[in-house]
Structure formats: C-alpha cells, structure tokens
C-alpha cells in the first residue's frame, strides 16, 4: 500500500475553508494530491487550511470563488487547471442550508440552496470534464437527508441532496466509457460550524442514530480520499452513506 496514494494527482474541492471541505483538503493533500479549494467569505480560514496542509508536507491553494456565480466556479476550474497543468479529482462540497417550513422559507433562500448545492456542482462538472482524463474522479458531497428526513423543515435542503444522488447515477453512464467515476457521499451529522456536535439540534440527531456520536470532517476526508484513489476504480454511480447509522 503506497503511503501517499494520490501522489501526482491534482484536485479541486469547492468550499474547503471550513468544516467537511477543510477535512477533505487536509486528507487529499496529506495523501499526496496537489489541491486547490474554493471559499466564498472565509479568507483567513482558507489561508489557515492551506498553511496547515503545507506544514503537513502537502500542497493546497485557496481560490476565492462564490458558488452562487457560474463564472466564479468556471474560473476556479480554469485556475486549477492552469496552475497544475491538469485536473484529476473534482469534489463538489460547498453547500448552504436554510431550515424552516416551506411556507416560511424566502425564495432567495430556496434559490441559494438550489444554486450552491446543485447548480454550481453541475457547472463545476461541466467545466472540469474537458480536463479529466482516464482515471478521473468526481465526488459529490450529498447528505443522508436525501434518503431520510426524520425532522421537519429540511424539505428543500433534502431535495438538493436528492438531486446530487440522481445526477451521480445519470452521469455514471456517460462517464464510464471515459474511465471516469462519479460518486456521491452521504454524510450523517458531522461536527462543523453548520451542525455543531454540541449544538441545539444535536440531541435530536443522536436520538435517531445507531451510534451515539457525530462524525468528523477527517472521517469524510478519508472516505473521499479512498474514492479518489486507485482502489475505488470499480465504484461509480453510487450514493454511499457515512452516517453513524442515521439511515439504519
Ligand atoms: N455537517 C453536517 O452534519 C453535514 C451532514 C451531511 C452533509 N453535509 C454536507 O457537507 C458539506 C459541507 O458541510 P459543512 O457542515 O462543512 O458546512 P459549513 O461548515 O457551513 O462549511 C461550508 C463550506 O462551504 C463553503 N461555501 C458556502 N457557501 C459557498 C459559496 N457560495 N461559494 C463557495 N463556497 C461556499 C464555505 O465557505 P466560506 O467559509 O467562505 O463561507 C465553507 O467552506 C455540504 O455539502 C453539506 O451539505 C454536512
């Protein structure tokens, strides 16, 4: 087993400045990939993620690119390709969530979820595909809420994550002839700013799970790295749960 299984690979991760995305950047870089990652607002935290990757012996470059804007996403792909001379791995991680009854959600909140969680992933995939070669990897970060929504107020967020699962299945058929895999990771509760393990909804979350703990960004990073690596060549079109038994 190589100690750096992604040596020589290049990756772009959307939303890598905090939380799950930061865990993905850290792990891909530690496993040898040269990583670019986007953020929208958290410049200082993005710089810290990049510095930590470098301190650990890896390479990571932050790119300010708002997933609300198609041209930002396209530019992030172009910058990554230009800087690295190619692209092997795309991880669509950036997302936003607004949780309220559908009648209380504002349309701008609904549009933001559709745009960042779904449309920007479509844009990133379209822009990346001309550059991905045989062995290329696309990994979407969905949510277990696509399969199970045990609480109210999650309908549109869950819809966006269900869309990623469908997109993943459909594209697997298009991309397999090119030797490119696409998969959709569906996390359960992960300890981040968006869903702190000591936050107000944590007791309810833990109450519907098989395990009695939140997952970590590092655990998602490890799963992404496996799917990005050579051992996962036969996995495509799948939505894979890493959820502590949330859906069990
Ligand atoms: N945490 C969980 O329990 C959980 C469970 C299931 C699935 N997920 C999924 O895991 C992924 C990450 O979630 P998280 O908990 O880490 O969220 P988070 O703590 O809110 O972090 C979100 C990340 O996405 C970036 N982002 C947000 N809006 C953006 C935009 N318009 N353009 C570019 N980047 C943007 C943020 O950048 P800035 O720092 O610049 O804002 C940040 O890096 C999401 O796809 C989420 O749906 C999370």
Image: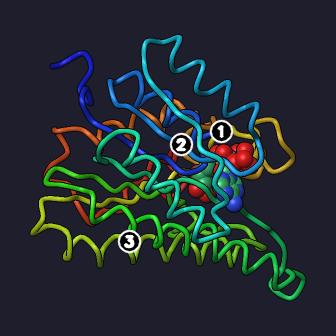
Mark 1 Cβ inside 8 Å of ligand 1: yes
Front-most of 129 and 240? Answer: 129
Secondary element at image label 3: helix
Could you classify mark 3 by the number of other residues whose Cα lies within 10 Å: few (under 14), some (14-19), or many (20 or more)? Answer: few
For marks 2 and 1, the one nearer the N-term is: 1
Above-or-below relation of 53 to 244 = above
Looking at the image, which residue is at 16% across and 38% down?
Answer: 231
In which image quadrant can residue 172 be found? bottom left
Point out the image quarter for the N terminus. Answer: top left
Above-or-below relation of 197 to 206 = above
Front-most of 205 and 235? Answer: 235
Measuring from the top left, give residue 23's x and y in whole percent. Answer: 54, 33
Is 243 left, or right, of 88 in this rendering?
right
The residue where tag 2 is placed is: 37
Above-or-below relation of 240 to 83 = below
Say whether residue 206 is visible. Answer: no
Residue 126, label in figure: 3
Furthest residue toward bottom: 103
Measuring from the top left, give residue 224's x and y in whole percent. Answer: 39, 42
Looking at the image, which residue is at 24% across and 15% down?
Answer: 3
The residue where tag 1 is placed is: 17
Q: How is the image coloured?
A: rainbow
For marks 2 and 3, the one nearer the N-term is: 2
Residue 27, label in figure: none
Looking at the image, which residue is at 87% across and 47% down?
Answer: 200
Pointers 1 and 3 in contact (CB under 8 A)?
A: no
Secondary element at image label 1: loop
Pointers 2 and 1 in contact (CB under 8 A)?
A: yes
Secondary element at image label 2: strand
Say whether residue 221 is visible. Answer: yes
Furthest residue toward left: 177
């Amino acid at each position: 087993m190589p100690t750096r299984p992604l040596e020589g690979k290049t990756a772009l991760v959307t939303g890598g400045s905090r939380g799950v995305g930061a865990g993905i950047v850290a792990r891909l870089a530690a496993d040898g990939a040269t990583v670019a990652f986007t953020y929208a607002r958290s410049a200082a935290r993005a710089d810290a993620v990049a510095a930590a990757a470098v301190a650990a012996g890896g390479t990571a470059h932050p790119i300010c690119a708002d997933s609300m804007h198609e041209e930002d996403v396209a530019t992030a792909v172009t910058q990554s390709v230009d800087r690295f001379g190619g692209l092997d791995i795309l991880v669509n991680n950036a997302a936003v969530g607004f949780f309220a009854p559908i009648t209380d959600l504002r349309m701008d909140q609904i549009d933001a979820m559709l745009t960042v969680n779904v449309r920007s992933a479509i844009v990133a995939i379209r822009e990346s595909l001309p550059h991905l070669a045989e062995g290329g990897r696309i990994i979407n970060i969905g949510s277990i809420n696509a399969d199970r929504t045990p609480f109210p107020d999650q309908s549109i967020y869950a819809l966006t994550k269900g869309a990623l699962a469908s997109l993943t299945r459909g594209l697997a058929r298009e991309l397999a002839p090119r030797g490119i895999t696409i998969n959709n990771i569906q996390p359960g509760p992960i300890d981040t700013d968006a869903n702190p393990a000591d936050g107000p909804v944590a007791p309810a979350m833990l109450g519907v799970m098989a395990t009695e703990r939140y997952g970590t960004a590092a655990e998602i990073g490890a799963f992404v790295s496996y799917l990005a690596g050579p051992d996962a060549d036969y996995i495509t079109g799948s939505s894979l749960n890493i959820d502590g038994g949330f859906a069990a």
